[in-house]
Image (spheres, rainbow, N blue to C red):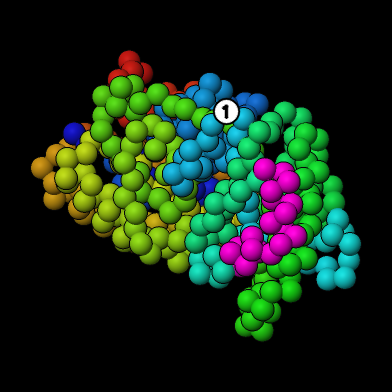
Amino acid sequence: MKYIILIGDGMADNPVPMLDGRTPLEAAETPTLDALTARSRLGQVRTVPIGQPPGSDTAILSICGYDPRLYYTGRAPLEAAGAGIKLVAGDVAYRCNMVTLTGDGLPFEEKTVVSHNGGSIDGETAQLLMGDLMAEPEFAAVMAQNGIRVEVSPSFRHIAVQSGSSSEGLVTMPPHDHLGEVIGPLLPTGGASAGLIAFMRLANAFLEKHPANHARGQAGKLPANGLWFWAEGTVAALPSFDELFGKTGFVVSAVPLVWGIGALAGLDKIIVPDATGELDTDYEGKADAAARGLAEGKDFVLLHIEAPDECTHMGDLPGKIEAIERLDARTLRPLLDALDTMADDYRLLILSDHKTLTSTKGHDGDPVPFLLYDSRKAINGPARYTEANAANGVHVEEGAQLISILFEQMEKSI
């Protein structure tokens, strides 16, 4: 038996007036998903426990069987693990986004954050900008004074680690939840915030003058002219996935968060070279990687598609619908074709990790729809995978139990 979880990050939503009261899932053309739904169980699951911050970090921990109320220490430590960064006691990890700030000539606090990913900065330019920034003497001095080092990635997502520090009393804000807002009220407060703000202020002053950002402007692109600290946390640890569930497995994703959860759980990862985490990601490559890993003997794969979430944060409703349609045609269809050629039966769970709302461009912690298909069973399911149809199905309140249902290790059957 093979087991697959396919996550369409943030694809669940609330009804959208611009879609005549439909959700993006309802508006998207998803023939593969529709055909599968008609043979599957549908339901709702609360992936984000009440009181926990709604995000892929808490939600995907739940989906993998780890209750975030027990194991969540912050998002950045999970991403650090995905990047191979070893944290020790006294370290605080932060996500360090490259962002776009507007308001040339205004004081730093009066500027506005308009892109959480530096205008979808490409990896090569991101590394160039960060390398030059960290070599700038004043910036390097502030890093040293505050015990900060930055691990650069070929994307807008970097990890900062502050040694000999504490996250106690510190409050930070996720930039993707505050697009279009003035940054003054959003800057870090409490705890070690003074050093972080100094770091962010110097980064903006340097990056907005960088020739690479000038070239981006000339090309009609947004500049990656700021850094943003958020998602702070301390050392994280997870029990072994194999010991908990008796399954070997791996993850396929373009984002360090998923790699990190997998690494801490003892799951392998398969890197897809052209996977970007955005609308242009290699959907077919991810399906091929998942099928290949299962064919080579693994029991389980977590296959993650980030694009619907990224499009929603950027206010790109047509892009969100397109991302869902690409997931359907270019990931799910070839994945099913590959699975159906294998000798093994399989159980496939498809869900959104959390809702990402078109109305706010931010995350929401309400229950999300899930689909569970078993290749051994013929079931008459509903016509489409939608939030409304799922609401009429079974409800799983404890998201961390869903994987045990997938593995048929709980008495509760759906």
Residue 136 lies, in percent from the top left, at: 69, 64
Depth check, front residue: 125 or 345: 125
Q: On the rendered structure, is 212 left or right of 189?
A: left
Q: Quadrant of the N terminus?
A: top left
Label 1 SS: loop
- Tag 1: residue type? Ala
Asked if the stretch drawn in magenta spans residue 308, the answer is no
**Residue plotted at (44% across, 27% down):** 238
Q: Is residue 134 magenta?
A: yes
Can the viewer see residue 324?
A: yes
Q: Is residue 138 shown above or below 399?
A: below
Disc 1 marks which residue? 89
**Looking at the image, residue 254 lies above or below residue 366:** below
Q: Is residue 370 left or right of residue 291?
A: right
Prevailing SS of the magenta stretch? helix
What residue span does the magenta drawing correspond to?
129-147
Q: Residue placed at 32% from the left, 15% from the top? A: 411
| Residue projecting furthest to the top | 411
Is residue 180 in sight in this rendering? no
Q: Is residue 331 left or right of residue 10?
A: left
Question: Could you classify mark 1 by the number of other residues whose Cα lies within 10 Å: few (under 14), some (14-19), or many (20 or more)?
Answer: few
* Residue 336 pos. (x, y %): 25, 51
Q: Residue at image x 48%, y 38%?
A: 86
Name above or below for residue 243 compared with residue 96: above
Instruction: Decide which of 303, 393 is in the foreground and name it.
Output: 303
Q: Nearer the viewer, residue 164 or 396?
A: 164
